[in-house]
Image (cartoon, rainbow, N blue to C red):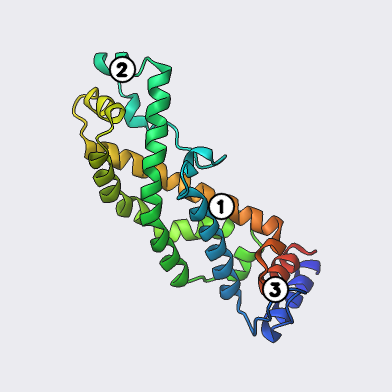
Amino acid sequence: MQAVGRRAVLAGFLATGVMALPGCTTIGRPSYTDIIENLLMLSSQRAFARLTQPDGFWDSQVARINMPVLFGRPGSVAQKVFRSPLFKEKLQRELNRIAEDGARVAAPIVYDAVRSLTVTDALALLRGGDTSATTFLRQSMGSGLVNAMIPELDRVMRMAEDPILNTAVNALTGVNMADAAHALALEADNAIWYEIGAQEADIRAHPESTNDGALIAALKLAKGI
C-alpha cells in the first residue's frame, strides 16, 4: 500500500505541474519521460564536462582507463617493452589523454540519444537503482559509441606520432594503429558509461544540486522522502 501511495502522489505531482521548490523555476506538467530525459541529460552533460577536461579520464575515480587487453598479448618483443612500469604508466596516461577526443565525439551522440529515447516504463526507471536510467540508455544505444569513436581515435593516434604509443603498437605482432584505436574505443565506452552512471547516482543522492524543481520533487517522492 505504501508503494501504491507514493506512486499516486508522484502521478498527481506530474499531472498538475506542482510549483518548484524555492530558488527553482516552475515546470508545467512534466511527464515521467520528461523527468528521465532531464536526469539523463544532466548526468551526461556533467560526465562529458569532466571527461573532456585535460586529464579528465585519468583523474576520474570511475573512468580512468586501464591498459587495454590488446597490450597484454604475449610475445617476446612485447614482454620486453611492457616490462617497464614507467613505460606502462606513460602509455596508460597517453591512452587516457587520447580518450578525451573520443569523448568529444561521443557527447553529442549521447545527447541526441537522450532526446529521442523511447521509454516504456519511465516510472520504473525513476524508482530504480542509482544508475538505472544510465543502464537503460546504454542498452538502447548498443555499440553506437564504440563505432563512432573508432575513426576519431584512429585519426588522433596516427597524428600524435607519440613514441610511447608507436613503440607499444610496433611491439605487438599483427597489430596496427586501427586495432589499437578499436581497443581504446571499447575501454573509453565503458569509462564514459561509468562516469555517466556515477553522475546519475550523485544527482539522485543530491537532487538539489540540479536546481530543477520538477526533478528534485520527483526523485524525492520516488525515494519516499
Q: Measured from the top left, where is residue 185 in percent x and y?
A: 35, 44
Amino acid type of disc 2? Val
Q: Which mark is residue 197?
A: 1
58 left or right of 100?
Answer: right
Q: Which residue is mark 2?
A: 81
Q: Quadrant of residue 213?
A: bottom right
* Gap in angstroms between the C-alphas marked 2 and 1: 35 Å
135 left or right of 127?
Answer: left
Residue contact between numbered discs 3 and 1, judged by CB atoms under 8 Å = no
At x 28%, y 44%, the residue is 156
Q: Quadrant of residue 172?
A: top left
Q: Which residue is mark 3?
A: 213
Q: Secondary structure at mark 3?
A: helix
Q: Quadrant of residue 171?
A: top left
Residues packed near mark 1 inside 10 Å, few (<14), some (14 to 19) or many (20 plus)? many
Q: Measured from the top left, where is residue 53 in percent x and y?
A: 47, 48
Observer-side mark, 3 or 1, equals: 3
